[in-house]
Image (cartoon, grey):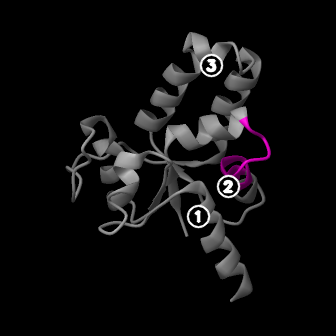
Amino acid sequence: MRPVLDVNVIISALLSPSGAPARVLSAWAEGEFELVLSPLVLGELERALAYPELLERIDPEDASAVLEWLSESTRVVPDPHEPPPIHSPDPDDDYLLALAAEERAALVSDDKHLLALAGDLPIYTASGFLTLLEERRSD
């Protein structure tokens, strides 16, 4: 199983170390699955971590360390060149749909626009993805 994590999941993991998004990152760090990211995802994460409201809540050194960790430890694939098989109501999210489709990966997001498309593509909340991992462990 290979998911693409939406930036909102990564940021939520940093803001709430005991929440479902943090548990998803922990499961990846423990080798339960291969995480797929692209330069666009990493760039969006870097920009988001520089927002003043996040700088007040996430130490810049921690943010830098997470960016470095993800850049060096995940499977960083080229950004998708094909359009997504379906489009999000928020066009800014289309690159995530295209990336997940191109890599044949699930998408983990807490974005309501993306979650509304879960009937068409494998898209999960962080909690839903954890449930999927649990089911896989018990098989």
Give me the residue at 63% from left, 30% from top. 67
- Please, what is the three-letter code of the amino acid marked with disc 1? Phe
Structural crowding at the residue carrying mark 2, measured as other residues with C-alpha within 10 Å and reported as few (<14), some (14–19) or many (≥20):
many
Q: Is residue 34 left or right of residue 79?
A: right
Please tell me whether mark 3 sits on a helix, a strand or a loop.
Answer: helix
Estimate the spatial distance between the alpha carbons at disc 3 and disc 1, rounded to whole Å. Answer: 25 Å
Residue 57: x and y in percent read: 71, 19
Reading the image, the residue beneath label 1 is 129
Structural crowding at the residue carrying mark 3, measured as other residues with C-alpha within 10 Å and reported as few (<14), some (14–19) or many (≥20):
some
Residue 98: x and y in percent read: 30, 51
Reading the image, the residue beneath label 2 is 24
Give me the residue at 24% from left, 44% from top. 89
The answer to whether residue 128 is magenta is no
Reading the image, the residue beneath label 3 is 54
Tag 2 and tag 1, C-beta contact below 8 Å? yes
Please tell me whether mark 1 sits on a helix, a strand or a loop.
Answer: helix
Residue 113: x and y in percent read: 34, 47
Estimate the spatial distance between the alpha carbons at disc 3 and disc 2, rounded to whole Å. Answer: 21 Å
Q: Which residues are magenta?
A: 16-25
Q: Earlier in the sequence, mark 3 or mark 1?
A: 3
Using the image as rendered, state which of residue 15 and residue 1 is in the foreground: 15
Q: Main secondary structure of the magenta part?
A: helix
